[in-house]
Amino acid sequence: MREGPDIARIASLVGDPARANMLNALMGGTALTASELALEAGVSLPTASSHLGKLMEGGLLTVASQGRHRYYGLAGPQVAGMIEAITGVAEAVGPKRVRPGPRDGAMRVARVCYDHLAGEQAVAMLDRLVDKNVLVRDEQEIRLGPSAASHFAAIGIDLYTRPRRPVCRACLDWSVRRSHLAGTLGAAILDKILAEKWARRETDSRAVIFSPPGKQAFERVFLA
Amino acid sequence: MREGPDIARIASLVGDPARANMLNALMGGTALTASELALEAGVSLPTASSHLGKLMEGGLLTVASQGRHRYYGLAGPQVAGMIEAITGVAEAVGPKRVRPGPRDGAMRVARVCYDHLAGEQAVAMLDRLVDKNVLVRDEQEIRLGPSAASHFAAIGIDLYTRPRRPVCRACLDWSVRRSHLAGTLGAAILDKILAEKWARRETDSRAVIFSPPGKQAFERVFLA
DNA sequence: CGCATAGTTCGTTCCTCATCGAAGCATCCC
DNA sequence: GGGATGCTTCGATGAGGAACGAACTATGCG
């Protein structure tokens, strides 16, 4: 009967299938409207609205009103990390997975994690950046190495105009079980990948599909 | 309406207050009997038994029968990690914390995380071991440095008789938000601390209280 | 064997909470 | 203004599941 932080409250918020679907959808990183989330969760609009209210009250979501739309998004990286952790356990524990599905393979290779790239590609990229000493692992934190600024400037990513949030962060990958790069730098790299059209987002999925030339370009820039 | 690993199933298991209390208690690392967990959760024995059945079926717990006792424990480090992640969010999100309570401070300083030490002390220890090059951070994994074997042998910890599980692992600390040492080595160090009576477990809490001489000994051995 | 302790199973009760339709606001467009 | 769209609130319904007492099984102790 001990009392710590109210973990049951948070977990039960994620514990409803409709809400879990919504959170999962939001792991894609883009904020979604209430109607989109209702569709995603497979419930009616009133039901979705009620769920969103609860998630807001629980502090898991933020909302931005734009005109008659309300865009809901995950409250922050910590929430995203928690969901990845739960996903990892569900993955490990669930022998129920009847269909490994084609999409599943793609998810393992590359997917969006909140606002940055995750999956084998992302893990390989971080490995390489550390190898090349562009980034330096120092405890949990990842820091910029001496050549970081010029390295990323050459690619077209400016490290100095990026505010507040830590530039680099490690984020544990549920499929590979190793770290990939998060933080504003991670987000900027994902932006770059999509802006250059090296890859596209699978509609309604977190999977990131590289085109053959896009994959080459990515490898040349980040894995060379 | 997408379908990934069944995160709602797992989260809803943790989402019941009684079960959350049980899991919290098991984060202490020692396996507990059904009656102890019933007490811990504040429910009757039949209710507890039902909950334990669900947690077992969900794969979050393991059980070992010894005579007429059944000892329940967390299914593994991944489950423990998930619970720490949820705790972190609950902590961050819950402004509801009316009583920071005296025990809370102790928990921040040092506590048990499944089978190893967590909290400020643990984070400081890992920092120091990496500084001294006894351990080497290499990606998410932590590896043994060249002097590790002799270093730990001198303290009385034999690294070679320890099987299967990785010797070192990083585990994210919810209070400090940095890594501390997990894995068999982390477990061995906690064993050492308790065996040498440098610290005692607060009854019915995860807090680890160092005695003044014990703290000195710990600092001499691990922080010097 | 008989009694005590540890756990599980069963059946019932009860309450929470997810769900949706209908109605109410808010915003945009014409 | 009026009509459309996006979203929330209200109220009623219903199902799932948490709770406990009582009865049952298993182990240990004399």
Image: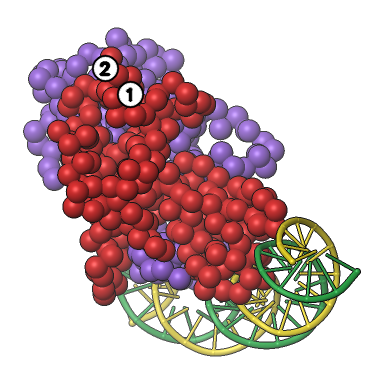
Chain colours: A red, B purple, C yellow, D green
Q: Position of residue A79 (x, y in %)?
A: 49, 46
Image mark for residue A147: 2
Query: Measured along the vertical axis of the image, is residue A201 above or below residue B147?
Result: below
Q: With respect to residue A86, does B160 lie above or below?
A: above
Q: Residue A98 location, x and y as percent?
A: 26, 75
Report which residue position mark 1 lands on: A153
Q: Amino acid at mark 2?
A: Ser
Which of labels 1 and 2 is toward the front?
Answer: 1
Q: Residues within 10 Å of mark 2 (few under 14, many from 20)?
A: few
Q: Nearer the viewer, residue C19 or B80?
A: C19
Residue nearest the observer in this picture, A198 or B166: A198
Chain letter of the residue carrying label 2: A
Could you tell whether A219 is left or right of A162 in the image?
Answer: left
Q: Quadrant of the C terminus of chain B?
A: top left
Subunit of label 1? A
| Amino acid at circle 1 | Ala
- Dot 1 or dot 2, earlier in sequence: 2
Point 45% across, 71% down: residue:
B1
Q: Are marks 1 and 2 on the same chain?
A: yes
State the separation of the CA atoms marked 1 and 2. Answer: 10 Å
Disc 2 element: loop
Q: Tell me the residue at 29%/34% (across/down).
A: B170
Question: Image check: A80 left or right of B218?
Answer: right
